[in-house]
Image (cartoon, rainbow, N blue to C red):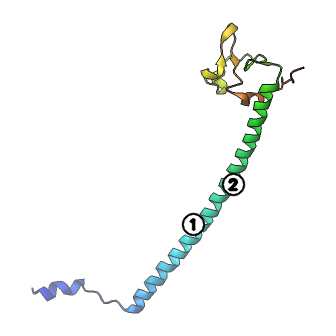
Amino acid sequence: MSIEDNLRPSVMLISPSDIEEDIKKLQDKLKSHEELELNDIAKLKEDAQKLWDFVSWLKVAQVQGVWKSKTCRHSINGRCNAWNISDPEKIGLTPDKIDESDNSKRVIVDKFPNLCVACPLYEAKRS
């Protein structure tokens, strides 16, 4: 067997029109992927905007919580005396946000003013 005989089966004749057709198919696939990417990007932008809107509301609530923690008559020396939290971990409060003096567990609202946001016991300090 000669070298030419070995090469013959591996040689393939392709016409330029076949290549053009393959290129066209690739371009069509690329275009459809680009359209999908644009849709994905638009969805990501929309989701990001929703998150920013949510964060802005959280900031409003946070400011309200800080204000209430400073103006509530139950807040004495940065500690809420209205609530005795029996199981702080159950509601997501870490030990550093709890004062355990006087055989009670009181929230340190200076460290966790978010508790004050929706507190039904809020009363303004009297002058």
Q: Which image quadrant is residue 104 in?
A: top right
Q: Residue furthest right?
A: 127
Tell me, for residue 104, which label it has, or none. none
- Residue at point 62%, 66% (across, down): 39
118 vs 36, left or right, is right
| Residue 117 seen in the current view | no
Establish if 84 lies above or below 31.
Answer: above
**Three-letter code for the amino acid on which mark 2 is drawn:** Gln
Horizontal and vertical percent position of residue 44: 62, 58
Residue bearing the label numbered 1 = 37
User: Quadrant location of the C terminus?
Assistant: top right
Q: Which image quadrant is residue 126 in?
A: top right
Which element type, helix, strand or loop, lies under badge 2?
helix
Q: Residue furthest left?
A: 1
Q: Gap in Å between the C-alphas at discs 1 and 2?
A: 18 Å
**Three-letter code for the amino acid on which mark 1 is drawn:** Glu
Between 112 and 30, the residue placed more toward the observer is 112
Horizontal and vertical percent position of residue 111: 67, 26
Residue bearing the label numbered 2 = 49
Establish if 42 lies above or below 76.
Answer: below
User: Quadrant location of the N terminus?
Assistant: bottom left
| Residue 102 seen in the current view | yes
